[in-house]
Image (spheres, coloured by chain):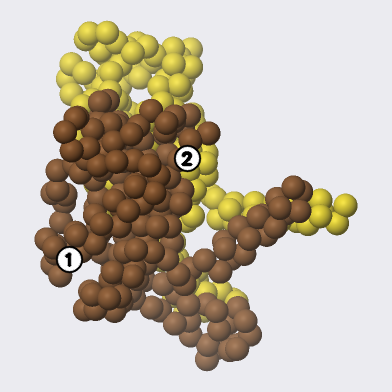
Chain colours: A brown, B yellow
Amino acid sequence: MRRLTALTLAAIVATAVTGCATMNVSSHVERGLDITKYHTYEWGPADALPTGDPRLDKDPFFKDHVEGAVEKSMAARGLAWATTEPPDLRIHYHANISERIDIDRLDRDRGYCTGEGCTPAVVSYEAGTLVIDVIDARTNKLIWRGWAQNTVKGMLENQDTMARQIDEAVTRMFASFPRPL
Amino acid sequence: MTLTRLTLAAVTLGALTVTACATMQVNSYVERGADVTRYRTYQWAPAGPQAIGDPRLDNNEFFRDRIQAQVDRRLGERGFEIAASTPDLLVQYHASVAQEINANGVDQPNTDCEECEPYVFDAGTIVVSLVDARTSRLVWRGWAEGSIDDAIDNQTFMERRIDEAVARIMEQLPRRL
């Protein structure tokens, strides 16, 4: 048990240190939530907010893929799509693309380059964020929000890459979806 | 034994990573001639949709509820009460996140610092405003700004950061004599 804790911590630290190059996934949850009282869900009204990138706005492929991946993850947790009765949960997602910059200091940090000639590389990239909200349909309160962030490079022009990225994002997000205690 | 030590080392390293740049600038503004201490009751002003500037926090109820609960707590400590009907004050908050660059001195012509390098970080700001409910004029405004790198992605750290920010903002509120 103790070994496990130490290993987990080491893994967390390792992730914290190396975590910038890959997909960043996390979530917020309602404190003290009892997930066992929810059994069914329904999709909420479509997102009215623009994504910040016309290539992604109203993209049916993106929408279908996100919804499909979420439905798969919900089914894996035993939550069923409500067809006749009012649902226990409503799901809503939002995608956003925004320009970000990064300053790459690895060369200097690792000693590959020193002194005055060593200019840090400034990298500009498009960061995509997929946010999934799960809402209690009766109280209309948010119970869980998951998100994944990554560069969208090569994603918008290649459907296979996009599909893979969405699958990874949703699967990893739902890994932190609350489980019955 | 070794494992315990390893655990400790990991915890320490983790804590260092987390608190590395946890500074915060806090300040406030009092309307000339206004006396905050003569107000007794308040209500939250109706909040519209919140564009915070980071998709993880836009319309994030957990974030909103945490800030409001902490402001309620601090106002309560100062003897303010939530009004059932007509309040003396309306309370508002606003939050924003923006990516910022710290040039770290490299933009200065005569810097001696060889190791100094610019870096980017996510800067977060929380602003709390107290508005006179009758006149609709701003009476007092306090704010905190700081790096929130890695804070949003960890709910516990985010909550702690909000708690600290709100406590320090409300500390600026003039005290009753």
Q: In this rendering, would A56 be left or right of A41? A: left
Residue B177 pos. (x, y %): 48, 12
Task: For label 2, count other residues whose C-alpha is less than 10 Å away and answer few (under 14), some (14-19) or many (20+).
Answer: few
Which residue is rendered at x = 61% and y = 57% of the image?
A12
Residue B38 pos. (x, y %): 35, 12
Disc on res. A147 = none
Q: For the residue labelled by badge 2, is the local secondary structure a helix, a strand or a loop?
A: loop
User: Are tags 2 and 1 found on a single chain?
Assistant: yes
Task: For label 1, count other residues whose C-alpha is less than 10 Å away and answer few (under 14), some (14-19) or many (20+).
Answer: few
Could you tell me the amino acid type at mark 1? Phe
Q: In this rendering, would B47 be left or right of B129? A: left
Q: Are marks 2 and 1 in contact (CB under 8 Å)?
A: no
Work out whether B36 lies above or below B163: above
Residue reaching furthest to the right: B1
Q: How many numbered marks, from 0 up?
A: 2
Residue A120 visible in the shown view: yes
Tag 2 residue: A179
Q: CA distance from mark 2 to mark 1?
A: 30 Å
Towards the viewer: A135 or A128: A135
Residue A111 pos. (x, y %): 63, 85
- Give the chain of mark 2: A
- Give the chain of mark 1: A
Q: Quadrant of residue A68?
A: bottom left
Q: Which is nearer the N-term, disc 2 or disc 1?
A: 1
Could you tell me the amino acid type at mark 2? Arg
Tag 1 residue: A61
